[in-house]
Image (spheres, rainbow, N blue to C red):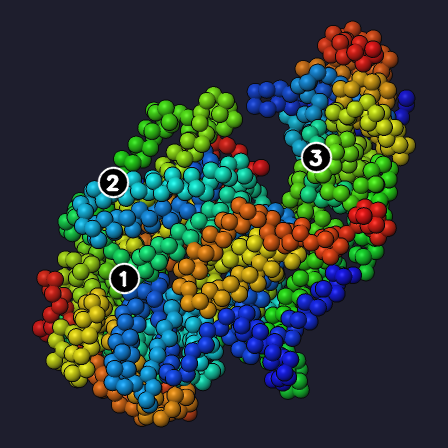
């Protein structure tokens, strides 16, 4: 029982960042119809920015976190502006190929810039964990969890309460109608991609200090994000949020009670189950076939 | 192959098209394959840095057989198939007469059939799996200790550390599995209870699930076998989960100074099996070699934590250079025969090879020293046992 | 007719290479390139002809490599507490055959499951499939040795034991083996796409509703394409395993799928020559870069940028671009010519 | 007019969400006739077509073709039973030549096993030769053989529409459904198309037509079914339809006057 509680605590904490990753990807897909293969690179970009500011420049941890996210947003906007804008209206395969090319170029630029040796980021939190009965949680992870929840809530508020969010939702529902109503589709696309990228960078910046940073961390982040959005249904934000937590629990319990080697396989097992029993994902808003 | 003038002309053309860079043969090339990227990148880079120190020292002293040596270092990306490709390239394209590599046991085991196929000697500087020298590959010469040697050296310490119940967390590759096997057998012989044996993928970064199970098992000592990147994470995460068990890392790729730098207080209280203790250079067999290496390492501004790893590359290159000297020519077969005759006063100790493996196709195995160090209050100390 | 002569000249040139290529290393590069070209040709069947962007293709390549290795090495696994399944080592040619069939069966299974969904879902499902297979190969250590890799894989021997045997070890025999398999693959794919089945695949790519209105069974055709494509990819994987003689779970990495995709789209998807041209470009290009002492990262960055540029500026690929420059007569044939007496009227 | 019924629609209803496209539709098509469905836009004609050919599932009702229920079958299964359609929006394989389009349309007539194809058996080569000859026949029948080698995407509109019919004919229909085949054609082209329909009829193919061009409808139909708002308001030969007050009110009125004048 004690062990289960500890596993559950571990899962909740990782689930928060998974949800961030998933929401970012699902937003970009839902609004832009782009399968974003660079998502994981934004994640590792966030983590490397954290390393650069905290470890190389010596900036304050919190300031660095904000900077990493802001730079992630900027990089996302740049990618959208340079690569995707001219492809608006192109079919999904074309944009996907471009994103794969961008992914390769970005990952190897990172490898060139930071070398293949893993970097670790020192966090300012005390090393002794918070102990709650049988469960112990490090302060760093707790911080990660809280920030992730705040970011999820902020994203919800942005989409539900602001003018930008309204325009994004309109674009999601019907791009042509939105354009007719005066929504600047170009700006919405840039904003969406920047926001999604910012969330991925935030996840990377948060988890960087928990784990280590190396150039290919983005790959597994991308794969996890894919699994999460399939679980939740492409384009569904609540789906991505809940999907993130489901994936984290599946992984943690699978690793704890089945076999640690299959930790990463759990997400894909879930995908297969979902495909068999509910092919539209748990929270899909639109028909997926066709 | 039959050659006629026209074909020869074509081949010149083709060579020109393919832009083959031709090097003048006034150097002796030595091949090195190391994981410079990927899961073992930190260690691989340290070994390569150590090898370059040896290259420069040897060349500063006039080289070998009147020629300078030239290292051709290839990145095997921590991947066995890539490792084979690098060896293929080193032998077929660069035509090196000897190779040092390939860091991890899995990588070394992967390249062994290739060196046998091309009959080029391989000096193994790091790998610890027993299989390497018992596979019947007469081109393999290992200067690093095997896991069994480590375990034998460790046995007297079992009582002193008062180990009652042990748990294992190791990578699921030849290095980790071989080490866990050797240590668990040694522990069992001493009557120690073996609890959970958890494994991890060499690329994994989150061990909270494994550590939670280990914590629940109630072991008093946890043996961890992997490279320094993962050890850092294991120490940090063990502290986060308040794992009380004493952590002992095996295999010598643990770079204690780097652990102190990166894991901070989480490293306190952990023990580490190393093959070179730069903190007390006077206890080693050849202090002059050790000090010369250490001075140069520091002078070059390399990561201090890498010193316990870099010396492997340093010794490996010295061993090959010495064999070339003894052989009198830079040819694979001659170097292979000469390796049986050399004695190198290296950082590992006095390196010389004894026969191991099936009769008639023995591999060479060196018997180096093994040390156990402890991290206390952010410093490496000689544990008082 | 011109086309046939050109093809034969091209094959004759390829056959001649080992006679004048002095440096075995370049032969090695050509062998590996050839294996990837076979895989790319098989991918082209799905990507180019049926128009399905399958990004899990490396799964079939890797399955072929693992199956062929395991059958030729033999194995023993414990499935249930008291049941062991074991297989004694089998001849390599047999192992390769099993690999092709097994990969084809995997193709059938994946086709049945994943063609329920299209578009982005299909892509993600195929990526996931490759990842699942990689994780299985990594963790089912009793069978696959996990990250320790399957080592010492035997090489192919053909002929009658102790009478006449060819051993495919070393560069020259392996080169000819790969060349023969590549020609075989080309012929199979060419026959397929120029037949009723191939036209049905192209019909799906061009206009799925119309295709089904004239009686094309969408699922059946897609599954057929996947089976053939998977089987040929498995063959490429088996060749790879018996050439490099080691397989590890990284054979399933996404980057290899990407390499195949780049080859196909650079050369020209949906053309027979496309994967060959693309494969040669991307097989030899890294060696040229290496000749200029370019770091591997820069090489990969160049790949990525090239891929983007091709999608922007040469979306159909190199082969169609060249074809549109050449006078038509030279490049006739290829993709289905008209009935003889129609040709003159129709294409004059 | 006592030919046997080949297609029988019974109580067909089609709903999308809350919207009813077709309501309780019942009519029969008889062997060898040309039956036209008319009605204002949104009357449910195309939805009925889609349901008959399996592109959408009806919410209720039966579709029986020569004694076999088509409901629940996939389009290709329905095509295999001889019911083939064209699409309202021009739909060809635009990347292929005209000849290749028709050859592709011959899918159902081919007899080639995948293994035989890959082995390159002579039977496959013979089958291909046969198919090519048939494709050529169809191009000639439709009258577009002169441009057989041109890519479909480069064709003028009128020929594209003919190509659609050729592709459908290639599937060897016994019942051909044409969805507004002459929309956008000029009068000469329309007249030519009417003679083409005559040639198709002569082959013994039954035709179900949706069309707005009243001159053509009145000229070639044996019988006309008029739909309005998802329901049948008339089912009669052209001469009677022209006089039917409800048809005139709902749909025909102005159009017909224009077509006559």
User: Mark number for residue A66?
Assistant: 2
Q: At x 70% / y 32%, what residue is drawn? A: D90
Residue D30 in view (yes/no): no
Please state if A290 lies on the left or on the right of D248 as rendered: left
- Which residue matches tag 1? B229
**Which of the two discs, 2 and 1, sits closer to the camera?**
2
For the point 65% across and 58% down, which residue is it? C273
Of C90 and C121, nearer the camera is C121
* Pointer 3 chain: D
Q: Secondary structure at mark 2?
A: helix
Q: Find residue D43 and report its horizontal and vertical position in percent.
A: 68, 18
Q: Quadrant of residue D32?
A: top right
For disc 1, the neighbor class at 10 Å (few under 14, some 14 to 19, many from 20) is many
Look at the image and tell me in which quarter the N terminus of chain D lies: top right
Q: Chain of mark 2?
A: A
**As displayed, is residue B73 above or below residue A251?**
below
């Amino acid at each position: 029982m004690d062990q289960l509680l500890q596993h559950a605590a571990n899962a909740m904490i990782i689930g928060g960042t998974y949800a961030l990753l998933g929401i970012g990807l699902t937003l970009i897909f839902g609004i832009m119809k782009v399968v974003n293969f660079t998502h994981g690179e934004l994640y590792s970009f966030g983590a490397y920015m954290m390393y650069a500011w905290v470890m190389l420049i010596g900036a304050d941890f919190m300031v660095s976190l904000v900077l990493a996210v802001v730079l992630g947003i900027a990089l996302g906007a740049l990618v959208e502006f340079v690569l995707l804008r001219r492809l608006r209206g192109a079919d999904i395969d074309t944009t996907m190929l471009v994103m794969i090319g961008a992914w390769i170029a970005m990952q190897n630029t990172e490898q060139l810039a930071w070398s293949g040796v893993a970097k670790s980021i020192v966090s300012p939190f005390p090393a002794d964990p918070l102990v709650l009965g049988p469960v112990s949680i490090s302060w760093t992870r707790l911080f990660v969890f809280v920030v992730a929840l705040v970011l999820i809530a902020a994203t919800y508020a942005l989409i539900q309460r602001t003018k930008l969010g309204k325009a994004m939702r309109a674009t999601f529902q019907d791009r042509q109608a939105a354009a007719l109503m005066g929504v600047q589709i170009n700006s919405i696309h840039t904003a969406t991609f920047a926001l999604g990228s910012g969330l991925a960078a935030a996840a990377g910046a948060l988890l960087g200090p928990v784990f280590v940073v190396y150039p290919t961390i983005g790959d597994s982040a991308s794969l996890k994000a894919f699994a999460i959005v399939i679980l939740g249904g492409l384009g569904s934000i609540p789906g991505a949020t809940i999907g993130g937590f489901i994936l984290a629990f599946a992984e943690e319990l699978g690793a704890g009670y089945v076999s640690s080697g299959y930790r990463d396989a759990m997400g894909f097992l879930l995908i297969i189950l979902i495909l068999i029993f509910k092919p539209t994902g748990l929270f899909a808003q639109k028909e997926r076939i066709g | 192959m039959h050659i006629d003038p026209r074909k020869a002309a074509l081949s010149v053309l083709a060579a020109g098209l393919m832009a083959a860079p031709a090097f003048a043969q006034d150097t002796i090339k030595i091949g090195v394959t190391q994981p410079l990227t990927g899961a073992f990148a930190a260690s691989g880079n340290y070994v390569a840095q150590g090898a370059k120190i040896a290259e420069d020292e040897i060349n500063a002293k006039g080289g070998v057989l009147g020629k300078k040596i030239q290292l051709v270092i290839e990145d095997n990306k921590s991947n066995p198939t890539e490792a084979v490709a690098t060896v293929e390239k080193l032998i077929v394209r660069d035509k090196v007469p000897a190779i040092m590599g390939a860091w991890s046991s899995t990588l070394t085991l992967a390249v062994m059939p290739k060196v046998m196929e091309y009959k080029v000697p391989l000096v193994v500087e790091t790998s610890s799996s027993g299989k390497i020298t018992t596979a019947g590959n007469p081109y393999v010469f290992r200067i690093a200790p095997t896991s069994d040697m480590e375990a034998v050296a460790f046995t007297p310490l079992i009582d002193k550390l008062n180990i009652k119940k042990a748990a294992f967390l190791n990578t699921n590759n030849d290095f980790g599995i071989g080490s866990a096997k050797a240590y668990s057998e040694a522990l069992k012989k001493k009557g120690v209870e073996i609890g959970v044996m958890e494994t991890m993928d060499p690329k994994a970064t989150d061990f909270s699930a494994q550590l939670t199970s280990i914590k629940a098992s109630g072991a008093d000592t946890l043996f961890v076998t992997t490279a320094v990147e993962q050890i850092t994470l294991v120490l940090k995460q063990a502290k986060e989960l308040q794992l009380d068990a004493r952590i002992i890392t095996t295999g010598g790729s643990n770079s204690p100074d780097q652990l102190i730098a990166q894991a901070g207080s989480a490293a306190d209280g952990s023990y580490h099996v190393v093959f070179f203790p730069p903190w007390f250079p006077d206890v080693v067999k050849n202090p002059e070699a050790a000090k010369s290496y250490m001075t140069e390492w520091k002078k070059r501004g390399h990561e201090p934590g890498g010193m316990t790893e870099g010396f492997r590359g340093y010794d490996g290159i010295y061993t090959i250079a010495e064999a070339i000297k003894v052989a009198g020519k830079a040819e694979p077969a001659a170097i292979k025969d000469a390796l049986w005759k050399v004695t190198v006063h290296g950082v590992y100790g006095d390196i010389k090879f004894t026969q191991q493996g099936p009769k008639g196709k023995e591999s060479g195995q060196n018997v180096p020293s093994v040390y156990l160090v402890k991290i206390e209050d952010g410093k490496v100390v000689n544990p008082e046992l | 007719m011109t086309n046939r002569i050109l093809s034969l000249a091209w094959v004759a040139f390829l056959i001649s290479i080992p006679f004048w290529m002095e440096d075995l290393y370049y032969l090695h590069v050509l062998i590996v390139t050839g294996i990837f070209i076979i895989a790319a040709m098989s991918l082209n069947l799905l990507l180019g002809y049926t128009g399905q962007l399958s990004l899990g293709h490396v799964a079939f390549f890797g399955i072929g490599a693992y199956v062929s290795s395991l059958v030729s090495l033999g194995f023993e696994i414990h499935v249930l507490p008291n049941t062991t399944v074991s297989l004694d080592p089998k001849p390599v040619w047999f192992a390769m055959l099993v690999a092709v069939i097994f990969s084809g069966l995997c193709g059938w299974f994946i086709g049945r499951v994943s063609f329920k969904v299209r578009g982005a879902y299909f892509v993600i499902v195929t990526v996931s499939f490759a990842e699942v297979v990689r994780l299985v190969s990594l963790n089912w250590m009793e069978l696959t040795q996990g990250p320790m890799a399957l080592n010492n894989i035997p090489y192919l021997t053909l002929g009658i034991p102790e009478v006449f045997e060819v051993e495919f070890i070393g560069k020259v025999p392996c080169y000819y083996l790969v060349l023969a398999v590549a020609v075989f693959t080309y012929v199979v794919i060419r026959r397929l796409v120029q037949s009723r089945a191939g036209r049905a695949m192209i019909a799906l790519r061009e206009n799925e509703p119309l295709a089904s209105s004239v009686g094309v069974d969408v699922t059946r055709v897609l599954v057929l394409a996947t089976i053939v494509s998977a089987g040929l990819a498995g063959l490429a994987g088996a060749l790879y395993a018996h050439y490099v003689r080691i397989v590890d779970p990284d054979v399933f990495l996404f980057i290899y799928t990407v390499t195949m995709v780049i080859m196909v789209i650079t050369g020209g998807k949906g053309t027979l020559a496309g994967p060959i041209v693309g494969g040669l470009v991307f097989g030899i290009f890294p060696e040229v870069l290496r000749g200029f002492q370019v770091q591997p990262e820069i090489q990969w960055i160049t790949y990525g940028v090239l891929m983007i540029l091709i999608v922007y500026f040469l979306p159909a690929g190199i082969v169609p671009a060249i074809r549109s420059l050449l006078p038509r007569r030279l490049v006739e044939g290829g993709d289905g010519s008209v009935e003889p007496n129609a040709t003159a009227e129709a294409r004059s | 007019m006592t030919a046997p019924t080949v297609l029988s629609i019974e109580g067909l209803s089609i709903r999308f969400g809350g919207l009813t496209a077709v309501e309780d539709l019942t009519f029969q098509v008889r062997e060898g006739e040309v039956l036209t469905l008319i009605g204002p836009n949104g009357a449910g004609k195309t939805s009925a077509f889609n349901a008959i050919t399996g592109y959408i599932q009806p919410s209720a009702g039966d579709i029986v073709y020569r004694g076999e229920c088509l409901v629940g079958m996939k389009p290709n299964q329905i095509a295999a039973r001889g019911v083939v359609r064209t699409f309202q929006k021009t739909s060809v394989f635009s990347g292929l030549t005209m000849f290749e389009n028709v050859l592709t349309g011959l899918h159902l007539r081919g007899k080639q096993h995948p293994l035989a194809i890959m082995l390159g058996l002579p039977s496959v080569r013979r089958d291909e030769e046969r198919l090519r000859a048939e494709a050529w026949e169809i191009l000639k029948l439709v009258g577009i053989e002169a441009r057989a080698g041109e890519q479909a995407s480069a064709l003028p509109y009128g020929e594209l529409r003919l190509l659609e019919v050729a592709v459908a004919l290639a599937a060897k229909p016994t019942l051909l459904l044409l969805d507004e085949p002459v929309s956008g054609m000029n009068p000469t082209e329309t007249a030519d198309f009417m003679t083409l329909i005559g040639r198709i009829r002569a082959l013994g193919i039954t035709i179900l037509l949706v069309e707005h061009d009243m001159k053509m409808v009145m000229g070639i139909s044996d019988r006309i079914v008029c739909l309005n708002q998802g329901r049948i308001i008339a089912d009669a030969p052209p001469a009677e339809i022209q006089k039917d007050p409800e048809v005139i009110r709902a749909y025909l009125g102005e159009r017909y006057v224009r077509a006559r004048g």
